[in-house]
């Protein structure tokens, strides 16, 4: 039981830091992030500007929310959905042969390494899934005991 | 129900963050497209409003199908011959050089503009935001 507690908190802190860091780099350079979003050729120029405005804040709050009991459940699901979306985008850009900038941690001049991105996001998603399972397990136990 | 409530709280916090970004000037207003131009980039509207030497950085086949009137074809592949032509043209009538590639995601124009800035000393070189797709509109 104690081990589960530590594993859950380690995951929350690591994932939280990762998303807060990603959000911070995007908030510092909204123009670069908008260009990165546009380079995936999924949304147009106008929508990419709105994404560049809102997505970093959603990542930031959801990243912080992982550590807050009153936001944890929603944060888990939102980050899970976001990661699935990112993986879909990367896979689609890879299949279309696009030479995009990832935009994951702000703008960079180097082209994306899709295999690395998919593996990295897959690992992050695995972390989120583990957290969701742990939360569900904890609730089931609480109900049984209560 | 719990998840919906928490997602709603996160959405509201996100909206509040967006408002802070706009009020603090950390992010330009999304509805003003002209404000979302990075250093070294130029919009179609700005470029059309002045004398410009256009440089088409797309593939030769695409250039052959259609290009901006007067645009020179210059890529990494034909750099040696293309840069001479561009130099002659620019020395004959110095003006702003605007490089465009296929669309917003092509990335070639930024790279070529960077190369041109060091090759053509004294020239004002920009990459066109939105590329050929924006020019055609």
Image: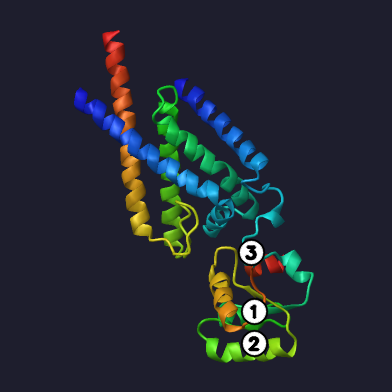
- The answer to which image quadrant residue A65 occupies is top left
Is disc 2 surrounded by few (<14), some (14 to 19) or many (20+) residues within 10 Å? many
**Element at badge 2?**
helix
Label drawn at residue B76? none
Mark 3–mark 2 CB contact (< 8 Å): no
Residue at (70, 68) in percent of width and height: B135
Is disc 3 surrounded by few (<14), some (14 to 19) or many (20+) residues within 10 Å? many
Chain letter for the residue marked with disc 3 in the picture: B
Mark 3–mark 1 CB contact (< 8 Å): no
Q: Between tags 3 and 2, which lies in front? A: 2
Chain letter for the residue marked with disc 1 in the picture: B
Is residue A129 something one can see in this rendering?
A: no
Label drawn at residue B130? 3
Q: Earlier in the sequence, mark 3 or mark 2?
A: 2
Mark 1–mark 2 CB contact (< 8 Å): yes
Q: CA distance from mark 3 to mark 2?
A: 22 Å
For this rendering, which residue is in front, B102 or A107?
A107
Q: Do pointers 3 and 1 mark residues of a single chain?
A: yes
Is residue A40 something one can see in this rendering?
A: yes
Mark 2, residue position: B86
Q: Earlier in the sequence, mark 1 or mark 2?
A: 1
Residue at (64, 87) in percent of width and height: B86
């Amino acid at each position: 039981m104690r081990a589960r507690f530590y594993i859950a908190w380690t995951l929350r802190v690591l994932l939280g830091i990762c998303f807060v860091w990603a959000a911070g780099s995007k908030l510092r350079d909204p123009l670069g992030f908008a260009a990165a979003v546009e380079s995936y050729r999924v949304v147009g120029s106008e929508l990419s500007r709105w994404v560049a405005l809102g997505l970093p804040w959603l990542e930031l709050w959801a990243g912080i929310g992982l550590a807050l009991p009153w936001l944890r459940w929603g944060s888990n699901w939102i980050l899970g959905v976001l990661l699935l979306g990112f993986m879909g985008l990367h896979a689609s850009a890879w299949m279309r042969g696009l030479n995009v900038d990832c935009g994951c941690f702000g703008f960079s001049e180097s082209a994306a390494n899709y295999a690395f991105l998919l593996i990295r996001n897959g690992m992050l998603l695995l972390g989120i899934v583990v957290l969701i399972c742990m939360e569900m397990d904890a609730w089931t136990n609480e109900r049984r005991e209560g | 129900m719990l998840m919906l409530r928490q997602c709603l709280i996160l959405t509201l916090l996100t909206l509040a963050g967006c408002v802070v970004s706009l009020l603090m000037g950390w992010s330009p207003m999304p509805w003003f497209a002209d404000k979302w131009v990075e250093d070294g980039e130029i919009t179609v509207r700005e470029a059309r409003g002045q004398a410009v030497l256009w440089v088409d950085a797309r593939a030769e086949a695409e250039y052959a199908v259609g290009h901006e009137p007067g645009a020179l074809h210059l890529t990494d592949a034909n750099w040696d011959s293309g840069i001479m032509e561009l130099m002659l043209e620019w020395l004959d009538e110095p003006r702003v050089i605007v490089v465009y590639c296929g669309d917003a995601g092509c990335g070639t124009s930024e790279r070529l503009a960077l190369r041109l800035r060091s090759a053509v000393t004294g020239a004002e070189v920009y990459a066109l935001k939105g590329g050929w797709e924006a020019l055609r509109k």
